[in-house]
Image (tube, helix red, strand yellow):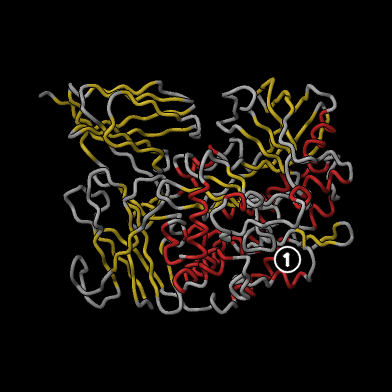
Amino acid sequence: MKKLVFLFCFSFGLIVKSQLLFNPTAVHDGAGEFYDVNSIKTIELEFYNPSYHPTLVSWKENYMENTLPAKFTCGPIYYDSVAVKYKGNSTFFVPNLFNNPKLPYNIDLNDIVSGQNIEGYKKIKLGNSWFDPTFAKEALASRIYKQYLPTYETSLIQLVVNGNYIGVYVNQEDVGNQFLTKHFGENNGPFFKCEPMPEEQAGHPVAWPNLAYLGPDTLDYYESYERKSPTGWVEFLNLMNVLNNDVANIEQVLNVDRVLWFLAVTSVLSNEDTYNGTYIHNYYMYQTPDGKFQMIPWDLTESFCGLLFGGTPESHYEWDPLNGLSPYLVEKPLVYQLLGNDYFRKKYFAHIRTIIEEYYTAATLKSWVLDLQALAYNPVLTDPNRPHNMTKFVSNIDNPVNYLITYTIAGMTDVVINRKPYLQAHADVIKVAPEIVSVSQNIQNPSSTETVYISANVTNATSVNLKVTNNPAAYASDFQTILMLDNGLNGDLLAGDQIFTAEVPFTTSNDHIKYYIEAENPDAIALDPERAEYFYYHYYVDQVVGIELAQNFETSIFPNPTSDFLTIDVKNQDNFTYRIFNSAGKLMIAQVDVKGQQQISVENYSRGVYVIHITSGEFRKSEKLIIN
């Protein structure tokens, strides 16, 4: 049989030490894209109804989800019909109380006319930065959160409505189907917005979405959680039941490490308007195909203490990262159930140390804010509806400022300068962790017939583990724990030299191996890479392969480029397997042992370059895919 042979090599990630480090933040927008924080775009809305404002206000005040059609322009993009409504809670009701037109907007590009989008984004959410004179807190918080877990992006937008400049807004990425696909490779799982019904609407005090288990009746949860997926109550109630009543099995239903990162970033940045802050809300829960719920942050406007409702600034700056466990608060089961576990608690404080070391300095944060404010200065200066003057725009970077005489809005660097020493002196933070000096991989591009050993030079540890998975999902999941040994056997070169070694158990061709190192002693844990499990080392088995294309292995991939659907057609084969990877090496979709034509929806993929791998028996094909 005549064969045509090609050599294919496609590598992803950043070369670090002697292995590849997977960088999940590569999916975020870059220069010139819609959520580029270094540019300010202008959105123009023109409502067909000249009485749009009182109409939208009335609907919002009466908790109605109605929308009005409007013409939409953003640069060269023009749509004559998009659906618009007001959004928000306090950021709506407070300015509306003062008859200020700068209300937060929800713009659905796709609702009236299907297929309308900007760079694939179908919904635009605009926050009015009402309680942030700097216009920078949400953008800065998002920038830090997204280094450690999937987080929405932000930029600044100028909004013009019916020819009138309304002002500068924070452009908040919608946590919806496109977000889920971007970070998890699909969007079909149970999905919940954890936001309570307002007290006025419920007719009684707010029922905060604290993940307490209230029994099997879904009606008991409707005032606290909004289901965003067609189904999912059974899975979501099971999560709460396990969390509260069977916590030993919590890792089967919850991505615990990602939640620990959520809690750690929230605590370091003093975001008091979410689960482990003062008010338990502003997050989403999404169940990925591995059966585990992921915790996704939302509405980061109150980071860096934000608007201080009561108490002295010092009482906020010294908010205990164990609040909920110590003191024990019955309304925070996610905190006391996880941080009451010694192992999870040590990982949580390892994460806190990492965030402090990497980003938590007043000079670093101020530099970012000054860059953003230099870009925004003139648009903010001419904003006719901003509630704060330009003096506060500048001074609130460093200093607290007053709001409505009674309240105080904390200064960002003031929070860091006061909170950092408190955190660094915390009893759990000062514990001496192991040190992971180096990590190495004996074969960089292994074949399926070769044995891969991972070694780590570690001091001050009582145990060292290789955490490794070959789960093909687009997100890190199901890491197995393999004890690493320093005994001179099984790949370890020399006993007693503090270099620990373990063998990777996965050798199947095309396996995507993901791993990190975890070193532990009785007091603390250390990780390498430090941002694990969100970041990790990785490689592909048979990454450099000879690709054989036989005459009877006929494949068609069309259309290419595409923006909505893709068809893969493989003829003369009983079955085949295909996988699509984005440019960062993240698996977007994988289907095993399928037949005939396969139509795939890619409308929620970000625009860019992808790679399709098709295998059938001994035959393989790889092709570049362009998403417009």
Left or right: residue 294 versus residue 224 is left
Quarter of the figure with residue 392: bottom right
Vertical relation: 1 (above or below) 94 = above
At x 27%, y 27%, the residue is 595
Residue at (76, 44) in percent of width and height: 128
Secondary element type, mark 1: helix
Towards the viewer: 226 or 27: 226
Regarding residue 299, the answer to whether it shows in the image is no
Residue 578 occupies which quadrant of the picture?
top left
Residue at 73% in and 46% down: 374
Residue at numbered disc 1? 414
Give the crowd class for mark 1: few <14, some 14-19, many >=20 residues within 10 Å.
some
Figure label count: 1
Task: Determine whether, in the image, residue 122 is placed left or right of residue 385.
Answer: left
Q: Nearer the viewer, residue 502 or 258?
A: 258
Quadrant location of the N terminus? Answer: top left
Rendering coords of residue 537 (x, y %): 37, 55
Q: What residue type is labelled 1?
A: Asp
The residue closer to the viewer here, 65 or 310, is: 65
Residue 66, quarter of the rendered image: top right
- Horizontal placement of 139 versus 532: left or right? right
Looking at the picture, does residue 623 appear above or below residue 361? above
Work out whether residue 571 can be spotted.
Answer: yes
Rendered location of residue 283, percent (x, y): 61, 52
Image coordinates for residue 511, horizontal then vertical, percent = 28, 46
Relative to residue 67, is residue 26 drawn left or right?
Answer: left
- Residue 610 rendering spot, x and y as whole percentages: 40, 34
Q: Which of 134 and 586 is in front in this view?
A: 586
Residue at 26 percent across and 34 percent down: it is 593
Looking at this rendering, what residue extends furthest in the left direction? 1
